[in-house]
Amino acid sequence: MSQTNYILCDENAVYYECGYSCDNLIFLKLGGESFFITDARYEIEAKLNTINCEVIISKDLIRTTRKILKNKRIKKLCFDPYDFNVATFSKLSKNLNIKFIQKENFSKLKRIIKTDDEIKLLKMASKLGRNGFKLFASYLSTNGLEKKETLLQFKDKLFMQQNGKYDLSFDPIVAINANSAKPHALPTNIKLKKNDLILVDAGIKYKRYCSDRTCTASFSENINFKREQKFKNKKQQKVYDIVLKAQQKAMSKARVGMSASAIDKIARDVIEKAGYGKYFVHSTGHGVGLDIHEYPNISSKSDVIIEENMVFTVEPGIYLPNEFGVRIEDTVAMQNGKAVIL
């Protein structure tokens, strides 16, 4: 992609290119030149923070972009169709003698292999995210009993953000008992009681890089989010142990050179062998970086070959409708040929 002409307006894609982004911009890469086009509200920050590009302040971003494309006599321009709505793309491309080439997710594909520096940032995000889980567990121990899921989810946001220091990677999931059987559960008015199963999926951003972790635990005054969990309910214990085995096996056997689908199969086989295959309803993982969902996808359909410095989640789950669900998730980086938990 280094010499291709392309246009971007996704914030994380632009941040990756030049070290800064905002919510009203168009980024142009034309051969060796780069242009960051935004409005006057962002002028000072854009000029201070962008690298290797010319900042252009405009009252009409599309008009300015079209003018540059005409002046530079651009004949071909790559764009990501997910980046532009129909109205914007129509205004941008109207009557321009340019061949617009659709390349889906080309920025995410470019970011699929992380640099060592990016892995350091992702590791720090994971470490800080883990600290958020500890703070939330401590709150649950002393104050969690009889609190509604809605309040617990709100409190989880506060503890993950650690006094407002960090943005969240996504809206966290806090789900009790039957609600945890929904992989993307929304909080309800269910109240937390002793020995309830509680599933928490949360992450924070450190210097824009995301963390992502899911823990399932049994609620008591000594609750923690460690991987060893003891449930009073025998079925919950059985399912938890199966999911943990699937997750640990997939992480320990993942190797550079494998296909993503082979990693998915390792986890899925454990769950299928135990008789719960139809209750594992999503893929085993997804890439993590500036976006919470990046490449590679660790799914049965993905033929991507795993390479050194790829970063992704390993998060098998079993969801029993109207009973409970268990998901266990860690983010790993492929280093020295193997998966290392961040």
Image: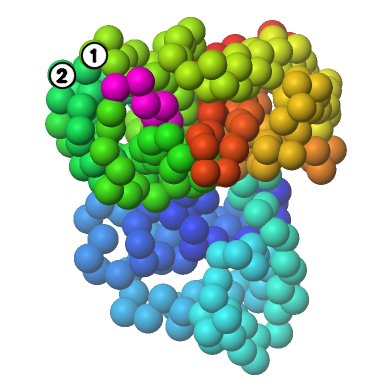
Please count the marks in the image: 2
Residue 283 location (% of width, % of height): 68, 39
Highlighted range, magenta: 194-200
Does 324 sit above or below residue 62? above
Q: Quadrant location of residue 172?
A: top left
Residue 211 vs residue 276: left or right? left
Does 183 sit above or below residue 259? below
Residue 127 location (% of width, % of height): 38, 17
Residue 304 location (% of width, % of height): 80, 36
The residue depicted at 52 percent of the width and 50 percent of the height is 13
Question: In this rendering, does residue 18 appear at all?
Answer: no
Taking depth in this image into account, of 115 and 297 the one nearest to the observer is: 297
Circle 2 Cα neighbour tier, 10 Å, few/some/many (<14 / 14–19 / ≥20): few
Q: Quadrant location of residue 93?
A: bottom right
**Residue at which label 1 appears:** 221
User: Do labels 1 and 2 touch, CB within 8 Å?
Assistant: yes
Q: Quadrant location of residue 156?
A: top left
The residue depicted at 81 percent of the width and 43 percent of the height is 301
273 is within the stretch colored magenta: no
The residue depicted at 62 percent of the width and 46 percent of the height is 108
**Residue at which label 2 appears:** 142
The residue depicted at 37 percent of the width and 81 percent of the height is 60
- Give the amino acid type for the residue marked by disc 1 in the picture: Glu
Residue at the bottom extreme?
A: 95
- Give the amino acid type for the residue marked by disc 2 in the picture: Thr
Taking depth in this image into account, of 340 and 97 the one nearest to the observer is: 340
First of labels 1, 2 by sequence position = 2
Q: Is mark 2 on a helix, strand or loop?
A: helix
Does 187 sit above or below residue 319? below
